[in-house]
């Protein structure tokens, strides 16, 4: 029987493992973190992603724990004028699955629970991969704790700074994209309800956007400010930010921004730099495949980073279980996923240029080109044909 290993128990690695488990294949998952901690902030699950998660058994969990924004509203950064109004109330009717917004930690915990319910003890923590090499019929992994493991197929879901990508696909380090993300979670009760209903609000202005939406069963508002900057900011999920620096960056913006930032509990603000990789010519080599951010990290302007990792996981599991020889199945996965993920990667970056343009009112004059108009939500990773 084919031995399958997944490196990284982030969203992509867990979805791949769960999709395989639902098809009767047990993969071993190796995660560097010493424990499966609940970390992160808000994350978007567009209908193409929520369709997969619901199909893998998370329907009840999502209905109970994720928010369904009634609309995505794009507004002028100074005047609060509405520039684009995308209604989301009937997302299930339109796309077959809702648009959800959720705390990443809640989703992560639900995926771990679903996986462990089907395949107990399949996740090994404290396993930081340090070295990988291909050998005949498989790959050998060496971990920082001195242990080793072999597998016939290795799926690298080890994120932006993937060791596997670096050692087998692309030795270059990720490059800084000149954008900083400020994040905060604010108790909804402490905010003026005028600014914060069930919609997702996107304020757009020169060189920056400020997005906010409810998570945690509506009790908390998640905000993310994406701003262009020349200053070098480290990548990571735990660098503290101050209210002063965020308010300085958003000086002159609508008062809802300052309200939000000022209402954040002390010590609850984070910042990190956004990094990217150049598109790869291949996602697979022999018995090793890349998935999620390890393969195609993207700017968050379409809210599709996690969605692409989720689609990858579902398609990879299908290729490995529905097609013949594993190495051919991996190549097939690559051919199916590379065009789509590269397109979304590039469109997300262009979307950012439009949203952060010097003239936000131009949004009203141009044809809308976004994740809706590009038809990205119709992708059905669990049911589409695998024909090329
Ligand atoms: C801690 C954390 C918090 C995040 N919070 C948010 C958020 O709040 N909002 C948002 O939009 N996105 C967040 N993201 C990013 C988002 O989850 C990903 O961009 C997206 O889901 C793609 O998922 P992925 O599985 O490819 O990568 P990731 O979710 O980044 O997962 C990669 C996993 O691989 C593990 N890993 C890395 N290197 C090794 C190694 N050498 N050996 C073994 N394991 C390794 C990591 O610890 C991680 O668990 C977060 C990611 C992380 C890791």
Image: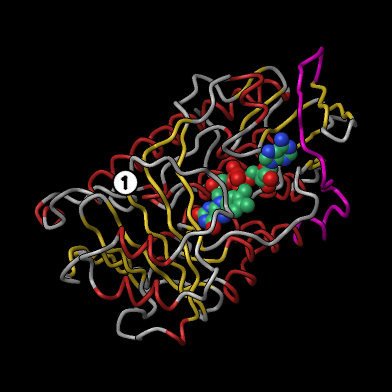
Q: Which residue appears at 41% of the width and 61% of the height?
A: 224
Q: Secondary structure at mark 1?
A: strand
Taking the image as shown, residue 341 lies to the left or right of residue 106, namely: left
Q: Is residue 365 above or below residue 143?
A: below
Q: Quadrant of residue 60?
A: bottom right
Residue 169 horizontal/vertical position (percent):
60, 20
**Which image quarter holds the N terminus?**
top right
Question: Ligand 1: does it lie within 8 Å of the C-beta at label 1?
Answer: no
Pinpoint residue 283: horizontal percent, then vertical percent: 57, 25
* Quadrant of residue 28 within the rendered picture: top right
Residue 135: image location, x then y, percent: 80, 14
Which residue is labeled 1 in the image?
Answer: 228
Residue 73 location, quadrant: bottom left
Q: What's the magenta region?
A: 114-138
Please report the residue visible at 82 percent of the width from the left and 60 percent of the height from the top: 117
277 in relation to 114, above or below: above
Q: Is residue 317 in sight in this rendering?
A: no
Residue in front for this viewpoint, 359 or 54: 359
Q: In the rendered image of this protein, does residue 66 appear above or below residue 18?
A: below
């Amino acid at each position: 029987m084919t031995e399958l290993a997944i490196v990284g128990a982030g969203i992509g690695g867990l979805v791949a493992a769960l999709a395989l488990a639902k098809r009767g294949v047990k993969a071993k998952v190796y995660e560097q973190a010493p424990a499966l901690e609940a970390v992160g902030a808000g994350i978007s699950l567009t209908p193409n992603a929520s369709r997969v998660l619901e199909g893998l058994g998370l329907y009840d969990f999502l209905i109970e724990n994720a928010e369904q924004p009634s609309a995505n509203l794009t507004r002028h950064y100074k005047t609060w004028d509405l520039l684009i109004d995308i209604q989301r109330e009937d997302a299930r009717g339109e796309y077959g699955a809702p648009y959800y917004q959720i705390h990443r930690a809640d989703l992560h915990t639900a995926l771990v629970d679903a996986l462990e319910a089907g395949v107990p003890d399949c996740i090994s923590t404290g396993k930081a991969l340090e070295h990988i090499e291909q050998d005949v019929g498989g790959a050998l992994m060496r971990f920082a704790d001195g242990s080793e493991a072999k597998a016939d197929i290795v799926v690298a879901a080890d994120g932006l700074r993937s060791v596997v990508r670096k050692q087998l696909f692309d030795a270059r380090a990720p490059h800084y994209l000149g954008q900083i993300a400020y994040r905060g979670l604010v108790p909804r009760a402490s905010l003026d309800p005028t600014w914060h209903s069930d919609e997702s609000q996107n304020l757009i202005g020169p060189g920056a956007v400020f997005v906010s939406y409810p998570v945690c069963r509506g009790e908390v508002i998640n905000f993310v400010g994406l701003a262009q900057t020349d200053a070098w900011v480290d990548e990571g999920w735990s660098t503290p930010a101050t209210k002063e620096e965020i308010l300085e960056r958003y000086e002159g913006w609508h008062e809802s921004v300052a309200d939000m930032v000022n209402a954040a509990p002390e010590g609850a603000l984070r910042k990190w730099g956004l990094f990217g990789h150049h598109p790869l010519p291949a996602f697979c080599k022999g018995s090793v495949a890349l998935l999620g951010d390890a393969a195609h990290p993207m700017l968050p302007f379409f809210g599709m980073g996690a969605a692409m990792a989720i689609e990858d996981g579902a398609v990879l599991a299908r290729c490995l279980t529905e097609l013949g020889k594993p190495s051919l199945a991996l190549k097939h996965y690559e051919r199916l996923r590379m065009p789509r993920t590269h397109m979304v990667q590039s469109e997300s970056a262009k979307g950012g240029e439009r949203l952060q343009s010097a003239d936000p009112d131009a949004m009203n004059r141009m044809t809308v080109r976004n994740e809706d108009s590009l038809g990205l939500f119709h992708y059905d990773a669990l049911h589409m044909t695998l024909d090329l």
